Image (cartoon, rainbow, N blue to C red):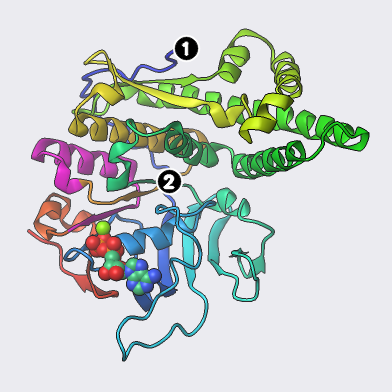
């Protein structure tokens, strides 16, 4: 494994605030989404702070925004699960399937209207996506108009748990640079399931073998493209981090996996052929396990705390959180510098867990990036450092109210 990146440790160099447009929601509306019957807010490009007691609906609102990107949102919920469930004898049942709509500014296509929600007509869970009033095939089109990453309390275990959550964290950042990545991952997963299904049958039948050959060829091409896009992301993060992030620790990022090793050692076409041959060779074993022994779905993101000289998983919870913040800031900076748009950041309950110095450093970096960060917390006082650089809303029982900035 190689560690591609080294954030410049400890550098306090001033951030270069190039006038890169930031992606920003200008209007957000939700219907029948979790604790919200109907809610809408108008906002500008500044950070948005949501405060309110536990259970008020702050994370629900961020989750709604997360559905503006491809995937299953920041809680990885089923579409029916996020639909408002009426409670109590007097509760009103939902008037229709849930929906989230936003007007988004700052993207390469100018202003766009994005709408998404559960398809009320479909039997299976299906998410509808509309861009500027036009229905889209699948969710991948969202990645072309939206760059969105998040940090939630659930991610506190990201370095302890299995690799899949780390891959998703990585892939969300790849979408920003390479909107086709979402579609490729989807096609890869689909082909992988199809192969597993075929392997459960009698794959000795001549027709099946031809079919498997075709699927594995497709898997190898998609797999190498996916791995290459992830490598590319790490290279860009490395460049973006050169200026340092004040008190946020320098991180070393690496990709681990057989496919990554091949890509590092041979041309992509050879790696593709190697992967195809590996799929063909593991049919019998994969038939037993129901999985596949190789491919980008087995890769892992390895993160090191460079100053401590330790893998992230051996760091304290606070250090891990700071590492994640440093990576997100590097991503935001890289996307701004290279694609000309700063992503939207959803930072759920992040401020409360930072000491004052780091909190202010985070606010300073968000200001320098001009990112529309969505920050939540129970106590508005935590955000006093943002002053009128941010817009404040109180959340309570699925309702939103404008607040004056705290001092
Ligand atoms: N599908 C749903 N329908 C109605 N209410 C929901 C649904 N899912 C979650 N909730 C409610 O949302 C509240 C949690 O909101 P959340 O956004 O997590 O709060 P917080 O402000 O602490 O982040 C809980 O009261 C929960 O019961
Ligand atoms: Mg919450």
Do we see residue 124 in this rendering? Answer: yes
Q: Circle 1 — which element?
A: loop
In the rendered image, which residue does mark 2 sit on? 343
Q: Circle 2 — which element?
A: loop
Place residue 325 in its image quadrant: top left
The furthest residue to the right: 206
How far apart marks 2 and 1 lie (CA) works out to 29 Å
In the image, the segment drawn in magenta is 351-377
Place residue 336 in its image quadrant: top left
Depicted 35 relative to depicted 152: above or below: below
Do we see residue 41 in this rendering? Answer: no
Residue at image position (39%, 59%) is: 63
Q: Residues within 10 Å of mark 2 (few under 14, many from 20)?
A: many
Depicted 355 relative to depicted 304: above or below: below
Residue at image position (11%, 36%) is: 357
The secondary structure that most of the magenta stretch takes on is helix
Sequence-wise, the earlier of marks 2 and 1 is: 1
Q: Is mark 1 within 8 Å of ligand 2?
A: no
Task: Residue 260 in the image: state x and y as whole percent.
Answer: 57, 18
Can you tell which mark lies on residue 1? Answer: 1
Task: Residue 289 in the image: state x and y as whole percent.
Answer: 61, 32
Q: Quadrant of the C terminus?
A: bottom left
Q: Residues within 10 Å of mark 1 (few under 14, many from 20)?
A: few
Quarter containing ligand 1?
bottom left
In this view, the mark in front (2 or 1): 1
Q: Is mark 2 within 8 Å of ligand 2?
A: no
């Amino acid at each position: 494994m190689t560690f591609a990146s080294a954030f410049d440790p400890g550098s306090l160099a001033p951030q270069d605030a190039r006038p890169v447009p930031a992606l920003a929601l200008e209007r957000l509306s939700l219907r029948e989404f979790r604790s919200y019957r109907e809610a809408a807010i108008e906002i500008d490009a500044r950070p948005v702070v949501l405060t309110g007691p536990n259970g008020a609906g702050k994370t629900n609102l961020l989750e709604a925004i997360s559905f503006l990107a491809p995937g299953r949102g920041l809680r990885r919920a089923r579409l029916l699960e996020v639909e408002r469930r009426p409670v109590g004898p007097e509760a009103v049942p939902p008037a229709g399937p849930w929906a989230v709509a936003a007007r988004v500014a700052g993207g390469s296509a100018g202003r766009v209207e994005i709408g998404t929600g559960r398809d009320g007509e479909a039997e299976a869970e299906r998410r509808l996506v509309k861009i500027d009033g036009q229905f889209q095939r699948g969710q991948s089109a969202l990645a072309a108009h939206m760059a969105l990453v998040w940090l939630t309390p659930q991610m506190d275990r990201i370095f302890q748990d299995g690799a899949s959550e780390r891959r998703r964290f990585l892939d969300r950042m790849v979408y920003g640079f390479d909107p086709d990545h979402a579609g490729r991952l989807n096609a890869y997963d689909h082909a992988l399931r199809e192969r597993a299904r075929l392997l459960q049958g009698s794959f000795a039948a001549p027709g099946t073998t031809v079919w498997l050959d075709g699927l594995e060829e497709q898997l190898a091409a998609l797999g190498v493209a996916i791995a290459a896009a992830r490598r590319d992301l790490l290279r860009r993060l490395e460049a973006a981090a050169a200026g340092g992030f004040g008190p946020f620790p320098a991180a070393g990022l690496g990709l681990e996996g057989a496919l990554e090793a091949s890509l590092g050692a041979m041309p992509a076409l050879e790696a593709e052929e190697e992967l195809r041959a590996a799929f063909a060779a593991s049919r019998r074993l994969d038939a037993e396990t129901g999985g596949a022994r190789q491919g980008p779905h087995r890769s892992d993101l390895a993160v090191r705390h460079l100053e401590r000289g330790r893998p992230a998983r051996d760091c304290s919870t606070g250090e891990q959180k700071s590492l994640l913040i440093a990576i997100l800031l590097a991503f935001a900076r890289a996307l701004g510098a290279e694609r000309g748009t700063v992503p939207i950041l959803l930072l759920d309950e992040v401020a409360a867990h930072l000491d004052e110095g780091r909190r202010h450093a985070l606010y300073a970096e968000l200001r320098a990036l001009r990112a529309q960060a969505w920050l939540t917390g129970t106590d508005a006082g935590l955000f006093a450092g943002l002053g009128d650089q941010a817009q404040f809303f109180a959340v309570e029982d699925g309702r939103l109210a404008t607040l004056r900035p705290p001092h």
